Image (spheres, rainbow, N blue to C red):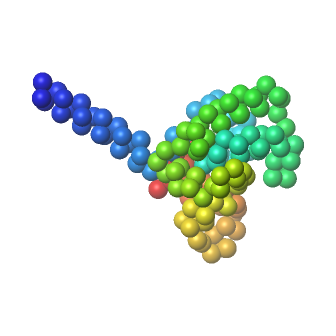
Amino acid sequence: MRALLAAGLLALTATAAAADDGRVRPVTDPAVLKECGACHMAFQSVFLPARSWSRLLDGLADHFGEDATLPADTVEVIRTYLTANAGDTGGRGEARKFMRWVAPGGTPLRITENPAFLREHRFPESVWKDPKVVTKSNCLACHRRADQGVYE
């Protein structure tokens, strides 16, 4: 019995450690993967609060200079997933440091303007102009498993 209890405690500890190992949950929603992933990596929703995702989805006609308009029913499916898993509702592990900078009621729209992001990405401008990188939001250029939530 004691061995079984110890094994269970060890498994629980390992699960807790895995849940806070610096990884973020990958995007699993098919609509998010299809629609957001058509133009860029489908960013994990834990990097922004729910209100930011709602604001982004409300402004798809001018999504960072592009018209990303989608049918209303698709937008609502995406909104439901992103807000349910946002940093202020479903955040854990690595995402916590991204939420710390968000002012109460703040609605940031760019993950790349987060002080935690900026602190980790102090590179010469030439890095961002590299044809393989092009933009700070191209996580996969340097983090080959970013779409899986691994940003090592």
Measuring from the top left, give residue 88's x and y in whole percent.
Answer: 59, 44
* Direction from residue 151 to residue 85 in the image, left or right: right
* Direction from residue 103 to residue 76 in the image, left or right: right
Which residue is pictured at 65% across the width and 36% down the height? 83
Judge whether residue 138 can be spotted in this image: no
Instruction: Give above or below for 126 relative to 106.
Output: below
Closest to the observer, 130 or 84: 84
Closest to the observer, 69 or 8: 8
Judge whether residue 19 can be spotted in this image: yes
Which residue is pictured at 77% across the width and 40% down the height? 57
Measuring from the top left, give residue 120's x and y in whole percent.
Answer: 54, 65
Measuring from the top left, give residue 149's x and y in whole percent.
Answer: 52, 45
The part of the image, by quadrant, that contains residue 34 is top right
Which residue is pictured at 65% across the width and 52% down the height? 104
Which residue sits furthest front? 104
Instruction: Give above or below for 70 relative to 120.
Output: above
